[in-house]
Image: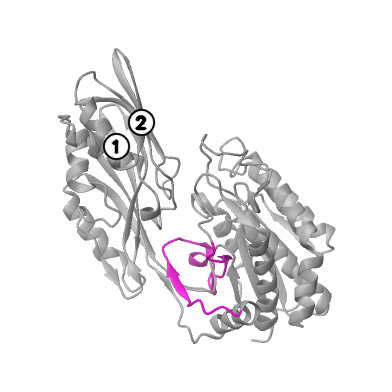
Amino acid sequence: MKEIIKQKVTEYTEEMLQDLRELVSYPSVYSDDAEPFGQANIDCLNHALKLGKDLGFTAVNVDNYAGYIEIGQGDEVIGIVGHLDVVPVSDTWKTNPFEMTLIDGKYYGRGTSDDKGGVVCGLMAMKIINELKPNLNKRIRLIMGCNEESGSRGLQYYIKKYGYVDCGFTPDGSFPVVFGEKGMIGASFCAKTEKIINIKGGTARNAVAAKVEMELQPDCFDETVFDEYLTNNGLKMTLKKNGTWKITVFGTAAHASTPEEGTNAISYAMEGLYVSGINDPFVTAYHEKIGTGYYGEKAGVDLKDEYGRLTFNIGVINKTDEMITASIDIRFPVTMTHEPIVEKLLANGEGYIINAGGMDPLFFPLEHPMIKAMLNAYYDVTGSDLKPLTMGGGTYARTMHNIVAFGCDTQEYNWHIHDDNEFVTLKSLQTQVEVYANALLNLLEI
């Protein structure tokens, strides 16, 4: 059976690439131009459902919040739970982010890895299973949400109508399997400013800010020291003087769960202003409580367990009247709970850190039959010795009971998920389909 699946993956490669190319063409970033999540999300969902209908599968639009494609019959449901929405894009991509482009063996485009690629691979795996076992006594359902990147309301709406699946996975994490996801805490850092006239930076709470634009009162800091500080830390900036000083600082984006892989333009801009002598309450408070660390060191929440370390990210910053507010995204270890961390964060924040709340981690033992079914499929297909892992990213596994993240990251590259120039490779896509098809066969036997 494994060899037949491998042959079919090769046979359906062009179809898979075309399906992904079509889905990537929809700029399915959250928008309020149409309820519930924007017209581009509606259009992308309907196109994905059409792909399922064209294969002869059941395809249902769940009031534009989500949709599903299904094969098989019976009471039990094996879920493949992905999402079609994507994070915003910056203006520093080297290609059109909504036109899948092949360069040096890499297919660039927003969503190629997160998570339209995973959705398409799940659909191809279902196509293969439907041909190999046409009389399934369980249902396999590809569930596609439309706002995973901005709150998961789409999947919550689906669950209210249809309930939870019995087992399954979300193709939105990493191989060989993610048996634990860190807990999550969101908060805000807020303080008054006297010298910053305006500021805007970052694109999403769950991404490291790649750019920040500021307008400041003239001559309020030493521009030479500021420039040297940024240069020494690998950042670039522009400065224009026309009455006020307008500054743009450029960092490097990354996912908030791995902020150490990026360079936060907001944090380095604030620290640069501090060391260059600005006298501003917001900048001083930021230096004292946030700084440029990735692990909440100055906020007093630098914690870790045997599976990983707490991470701390500033994602978006804006100014309203005299107050500047920056978003905080924390991912904390899988053996901890959020309440004690929130208490410590608020106490150490001394009034600058506010509106903190969170959710506890997700954790499955490695001996769980569902985990073993997925691991066996991955190892049988790849022969790899990669170890199961936990991660800081939040997936649909937190919302949909009885599933874990399984792929799509094959750990060969930094795919630049949530970053400029996100990409996927053909090898990765083919591996995903092959592994998912074998995993579905294993899950059918549970």
User: Is 152 drawn above or below residue 231 in the view shown?
Assistant: below
Residue 383 at x, y percent in the picture = 60, 80
User: Is 243 drawn above or below residue 179 in the view shown?
Assistant: above
User: What residue sits right under mark 1 in the picture?
Assistant: 230
Quadrant position of the N terminus in the picture: bottom right
Q: Residue at x 64, y 67 (%)?
A: 80
Please identify the quarter of the rendering in which residue 433 is found. Answer: bottom right
User: What residue sits right under mark 2 in the picture?
Assistant: 237
Residue 180 at x, y percent in the picture = 44, 72
Q: Secondary structure at mark 2?
A: strand
Tell me which colouring the rendered structure shows. one colour
Q: Secondary structure at mark 1?
A: helix
- The residues colored magenta run 383-412
Q: Amino acid at mark 1?
A: Leu
User: Is 225 drawn above or below residue 65 in the view shown?
Assistant: above
Residue 10 at x, y percent in the picture = 78, 67
Task: Say if residue 35 shows up in the picture.
Answer: yes
Q: Main secondary structure of the magenta part?
A: loop
Which callout, 2 or 1, points at the residue further toward the start of the chain? 1
Q: Could you tell me if the residues under marks 2 and 1 are in contact, i.e. CB atoms within 8 Å?
A: yes
Q: Amino acid at mark 2?
A: Met
Q: Residue at x 39, y 49 (%)?
A: 262
Specify few, some or many for label 2: CA neighbours under 10 Å numbering under 14, 14-19, or 20 or more.
some
How far is mark 2 from mark 1, CA to CA? 8 Å
Quadrant position of the C terminus in the picture: bottom right
